[in-house]
Image (spheres, helix red, strand yellow):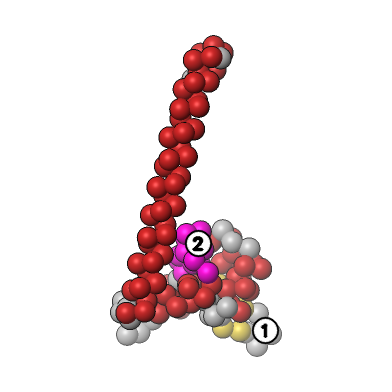
Amino acid sequence: MSPTTEELRMLRIGEIAARSGVSVRALRYYEEQGLLDAERTASGQRRYPENAVDRVRFIQQLYAAGLTSKDVLALLPCVHTGVATPAMMALLLEQRGRIDRQIAELSKARERLDEVIRIGRDYVPEVAAAS
């Protein structure tokens, strides 16, 4: 399969950082961890394909979900090939279960906070009027 025009367009590290919303330092870290590949120019500057922006955003989502760089590295081949090994599936299901537990805990915290807000509105007239 030949690369698309978008894949052929190469971006500098600052462009990737700006478009993906992460720091240049984070991009260098991703590269050190094997999560992101860069080509080097003759002068040593990093160049990334334009589709690296989506990859960086996905990596950020996985980090935000609590995965480690080691976990992300293990999962990325599955993302690119569409094929998961039993070990990858186990990791994915484990992480999904962990995220589901976090969501449940956050929902409970929000419900408690809503109750405190309701109580506060009942006792502080200016808060009730403002909302």
Q: How many marks?
A: 2
Tell whether 20 sits left or right of 99. Answer: right
For the residues labelled 1 and 2, say whether their Cβ atoms are less than 8 Å apart. no
Q: Is residue 67 magenta?
A: yes
What's the distance in space between the residues labelled 1 and 2, CA to CA? 33 Å
Of mark 1 and mark 2, the one earlier in the sequence is: 1
Query: In the rendered view, would you say 57 is above or below 5?
Result: above
Is residue 5 visible in the rendered image? The answer is no
Name which residue lies at 35% across and 67% down.
93
Name which residue lies at 48% across and 73% down.
71
Q: Secondary structure at mark 2?
A: loop
Q: Mark 1 highlights which residue? A: 44
Name which residue lies at 40% across and 47% down.
104
Query: In the rendered view, would you say 7 is above or below 116?
Result: below
Is residue 86 visible in the rendered image? The answer is yes
The answer to which image quadrant residue 1 occupies is bottom left
Tell whether 117 sits left or right of 107. Answer: right
Callout 2 crowding tier (Cα within 10 Å): few <14, some 14–19, many ≥20: some
Q: Mark 2 highlights which residue? A: 66
Question: Looking at numbered disc 2 in the image, what kind of residue is underneath it?
Answer: Gly
Name which residue lies at 39% across and 72% down.
91
Give whichever of 131, 13 is nearer the camera: 131
Query: In the rendered view, would you say 122 is above or below 71?
Result: above
Q: Residue furthest top?
A: 125
Part of the protein shown in magenta: 53-68
